[in-house]
Image (tube, helix red, strand yellow):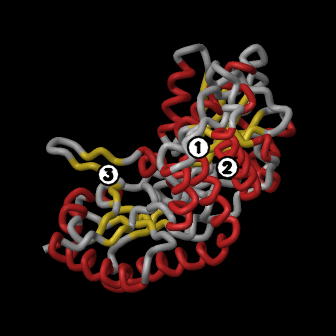
Amino acid sequence: MTKPIYLDYNGTTPHAPEVIEAMRPFLESEFGNPSSSHWYGIRPKQAVDAARRQTASLLGCSAGEVIFTSGGTESNNQALKSIGGSRYAQGNHIITSQIEHPAVLEVCRSLERYGFAVTYLPVDGDGLLDPAALAAAITPKTIMISIMHANNEVGTLQPVAEISTLAREKGILMHTDAAQSVGKVAVRVDELGVDLLSVAGHKIYAPKGVGALYIRDGVKPEIFCHGAGQERGIRAGTENVLGVVGLGKACEIAGQELISHADHMRRMRDRLEEGLAGALGDIRFNGHRQKRLPNTASVSFPGLAANRILEEIGLEVAASAGAACHADHVQISHVLEAMQIPEVWAKGTIRFTTGRMTTAAEIDRALEVVVAAVKRLRG
């Protein structure tokens, strides 16, 4: 059986061949503990150090500002909880948006149970946050702002640099979840002006189970995990050398090929969007049309149910839904709800995301499959 065409790169990415080759020695022979003082620990330690430099180079920071984690979710958790804890004496107010990933929203809800106050800012119909509304939400007790760089469902890019300027003027720390933007657009911490930034390995062709958290020099978080003092004493635990090496290599490739990869993903996405619009007409695209990731197409098919569309195309095209339709109700994603997309559109929303392995032939075949399925379902 032929595998379906993969158009869910925002969900996860395959391992890049170069990443697999970089990891291979640490799967086959280099098994040592990087903290060991003997011969077996030398090459693993060198590899972790090299990966830290590779990651830092992509982000435009120093290697000492990069902490390796188990992924984007942990990075977000640690950013919010560690700063919340270290700054609680100064205030208990956090600002975020209604369209954040659950790895931020659920952390904020957890912190509310421990005495924190959280403001969840709305977005407009394009998924964009208004910096003026954020400025108005700041109080003397605000200690942290966490706004994602790019939305995982609709691809809208937020004005993080502008928000960071507001935060800096008030002495507030700024965190951004950059899991979806790293490797697709330029993500430089100096240009964004952030104090903390989260990276997920499996979104940039590295393994699952590894990520990074940038913490600007001078920012003093609480210790994430107590133990033997790895990762500057902030996150103890024997390093995931295999994953860290893969993440470092993936960051190196992303830095070297960012423009060409972004251009390719954009061409593939545009080919898909233009084909759908030309063949079906009565559809809408969600998210800002210019300020967005180069690979993300959120498409609404009015009057249809997203899960039925996926059932029709599932053997030939892999994508994801923006709504789940159950027997007695429709569960629309919190992102589409926050954007106030009408239910007749929202319930039929599919996210297609291209990657650097996507080919024009795959897009053309996907168009045939999706267009035929929508026409069948429309009767």
For the residue labelled by badge 2, is the local secondary structure a helix, a strand or a loop? Answer: helix
Mark 3 → mark 1, Cα distance in angstroms: 38 Å
> What kind of residue is marked 1?
Val
Q: Quadrant of the C terminus?
A: bottom left
Residue 239 seen in render: yes
Q: Report the residue marked by disc 2.
A: 47
Instruction: Decide: few, some or many residues near mark 1? Use Cα within 10 Å; few <14, some 14-19, many ≥20.
Output: many
Of residue 215 and residue 342, the one placed in the foreground of this image is 215
Of pointers 3 and 1, the one earlier in the residue sequence: 1
> What kind of residue is marked 3?
Ala
Mark 1 → mark 2, Cα distance in angstroms: 8 Å
Cβ–Cβ below 8 Å for labels 3 and 1?
no
Of pointers 3 and 2, the one earlier in the residue sequence: 2
Task: Please give left or right for residue 366 compared with residue 327 in the image.
Answer: right
The residue drawn where x is 66% and y is 39% is: 41
Of pointers 1 and 2, the one earlier in the residue sequence: 2
Q: Report the residue marked by disc 1.
A: 241
Q: Report the residue marked by disc 3.
A: 323
Mark 3 → mark 2, Cα distance in angstroms: 42 Å
Where on the picture, by quarter, is residue 291? bottom right
Residue 267, horizontal then vertical, whole percent: 52, 81
Residue 224, horizontal then vertical, whole percent: 64, 25
Where on the picture, by quarter, is residue 42? top right
